[in-house]
Image (tube, rainbow, N blue to C red):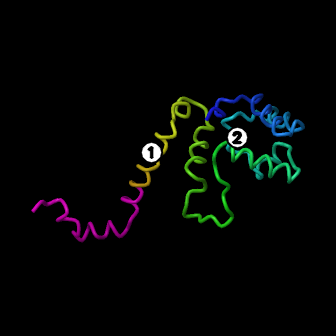
Amino acid sequence: MAFLQWSCEDVAGWIESLGFPQYKACFTDNQITGRKLIYVNCVYLPRLGITDFTDMQVISAHVRKLLGITEALWSHSIAEPRRDSAGLFLEKKSRTGERADSLTYQHFLDDMQKEKTLSLRVHNPCIETYARLGYFANLHKRP
């Protein structure tokens, strides 16, 4: 994930290498660093000054490929995370500060798993009801 260390100029150079030298200034003027690439998609490109739809699609596809993320489908369930785990990690890394700097992908995945486990324990009404009724009372007893 070397792109996380890219400066605005590095990102602009990469955009130029993709065949879009006309958009270099869009990325440097808006201070798009490697950490901010997670937000470069067809929704946000017009805000950067890129409005040609074909160019937007091509740039977005290259960004997704570079970052190793998938495009969110329109049929995506709201019950699921809005991005895959790599995308969620890159959103966290897009921030600045010690916590974002020290965050590793493995640590992020571990934290996600802990949150998921805690969420299932705390927010599962069936488990809470069974616990109140004593269904789990004998689970810890050894024969």
Tell me the SS state at disc 1: helix
Residue located 64% across and 33% down the image:
4
Q: Is residue 81 above or below residue 86?
A: below
Direction from residue 46 to residue 40 in the image, left or right: left
Direction from residue 115 to residue 19 in the image, left or right: right
Closer to the chain start, of discs 1 and 2, is 2
Q: Is residue 100 above or below residue 91?
A: above
* Residue 74 forms part of the magenta stretch: no
Residue located 55% across and 49% down the image:
85
Tell me the SS state at disc 2: helix
* Image quadrant where residue 14 sits: top right
* Image quadrant where residue 122 sits: bottom left
x and y, in percent, of residue 123 in the image: 40, 62
Q: Nearer the viewer, residue 1 or 33?
A: 1
* Residue 134 forms part of the magenta stretch: yes
x and y, in percent, of residue 57 in the image: 80, 52
Q: Is residue 100 above or below residue 121?
A: above
Q: Nearer the viewer, residue 80 or 10?
A: 10
Give the position of the C terminus as an image quadrant: bottom left
- Report the disc number at residue 37: 2
Give the residue type that dot 1 points to: Asp
Q: Is residue 16 above or below residue 126?
A: above
Direction from residue 65 to residue 133 in the image, left or right: left
Residue located 66% across and 57% down the image:
72
Give the position of the N terminus as an image quadrant: top right
Give the residue type that dot 2 points to: Leu
x and y, in percent, of residue 112 in the image: 47, 48
x and y, in percent, of residue 121 in the image: 36, 59
What's drawn in magenta, residue-wise?
119-143
The residue that label 1 is drawn on is 111
